Amino acid sequence: MVSRHNSLRLVALLAGLGAVPLVAQTPVRLSFADAVRRAAGEAPAVALAGLRTDEADARVRQARSALLPSLSVGGAWVNRDFNSQSLGIPFPPAFNLPNPVPPFNNYDGRVTVTQALFDWSGVRRVRAASAQADGSRADRGVTVEGAAQAAAVAYLRAARAQTVVAARQADSSIAAELVTLAEAQKAAGVSAAIDVTRTQLVRAEGLLIVARNERDRDRIDVTRTLGLDPATRLELADTLAGTLGAADLPAARDALLTAAFAGRPDLSAELARAAAARRTGSAIRAERLPRIGVEADYGVNGMTVPSALSTRQVALQVTLPILDGFHREARAAEQDAVVRESEVRERDLRQQIIADVDAALLDLRSAEAQQLIAADQLRLAEDELSQSRQRFKAGVAGNIEVIDAQSNLIRARDTDIDARFAAATARVALARAAGVARTLH
């Protein structure tokens, strides 16, 4: 049997353990909407996706540079000699040329400009790079949606854990009240057995410690989804209310699907990848067309710098590819295969979007129905406990009846919390299925 002294010591020990804070610092107040908004804009995964988008934009500028003028400045100094016999040129003796020619200097400095006048393949490559950049931006949207959903679910778990802590605190208060009432009845000679109520009190305090630990762990998970220091203390501004996790979405299924097809960034990313592959294939085929370019230079050339003379050159170049060992055709065939692969993924993704929306709607309807039932069960359990406490206080019922009623209330509270959590997560899943998780509030 558990003595009263040992029971109270154990309760005090458990309560002390549960009261240990993570870090002594001012807590940061955070609402559900703030968490979603912060994750969508500042989460590490979102920052990395933004950098990848910058890389794709830089590749567009790289592709465009082939169509823009190129300007360079160069200079050279040469000291050489030569022998006409090494060149295979027999100069007649009448020229009276020294052979070999003694060493001499040559100085040259000039400015060179090149410009592509017609390069259709280069134009198509720029367009392909632009499509790839669009795909990168859509991929960033996928990352934003994922980060928003992760932050929303983490916040809901922390809010659920916080609600569980409040429920366990209420259970502990009820258990302590029952112990006090049982002791009073024992002193009055009405009841002799109070060990069960003491055990119930210790059990309630133990569940409270577990709940507090779970709450603190879930708050750490929230900080990680937001890219914050895990030691940051959070104060959740929202609870598991009936509208938590809502988003501005149409109620009809067809309207939801239309919004999902238009707003899902993963579908936009797949469409952009297909467009990039088509444009890349077009750029490869355009390599068969002639390329026209102009090159001009102006500079000075001479054996000494003071005596250097001005020289210039203008050249028009036309290049027409004929045969490259069918390498060009193989590259074009590769891009055609990439296009067909992307089309298969697009069809599958559209079916997956339909499945996501339908599954989220089913989960939401089920969770809302469970929430109504759980609320009725909680109300009935509270009434049952209230009546049992009154009967126990009047001495017409034993402590077993009260403890059973308290156990029923604990289960009803847990069921109600789980139902509210399921409804909120279903709303988040529906927003993610429609591609608007970043607008959760």
Image (tube, grey):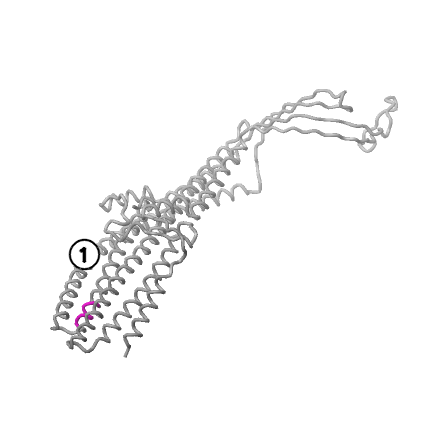
| Element at label 1 | helix
Give me the residue at 86% from left, 29% from top: 99
| Mark 1 lies on residue | 372
Residue at the bottom extreme, as displayed:
1
Residue 405 on the magenta span? yes
* Residue 184, image x, y percentages: 18, 72
* Residue 89, image x, y percentages: 81, 29
Give me the residue at 33% from left, 53% from top: 153
* Residue 140, image x, y percentages: 41, 44
Mark 1: amino acid: Leu
Image vertical order of residue 244 relative to residue 129, above or below: below
Image vertical order of residue 376 relative to residue 49, above or below: below
Give me the residue at 71% from left, 22% from top: 300
Q: In which quarter of the image is the N terminus?
A: bottom left
User: Where does the magenta region start and end?
Assistant: 401-406
Residue 71 location, quadrant = top right
Residue at the front extreme, as displayed:
187
* Residue 301, image x, y percentages: 73, 24
Q: In this view, does 129 lie to the left or right of 359?
A: right
Comparing 53 with 122, the one in front is 53
Magenta part mainly helix, strand or loop? helix
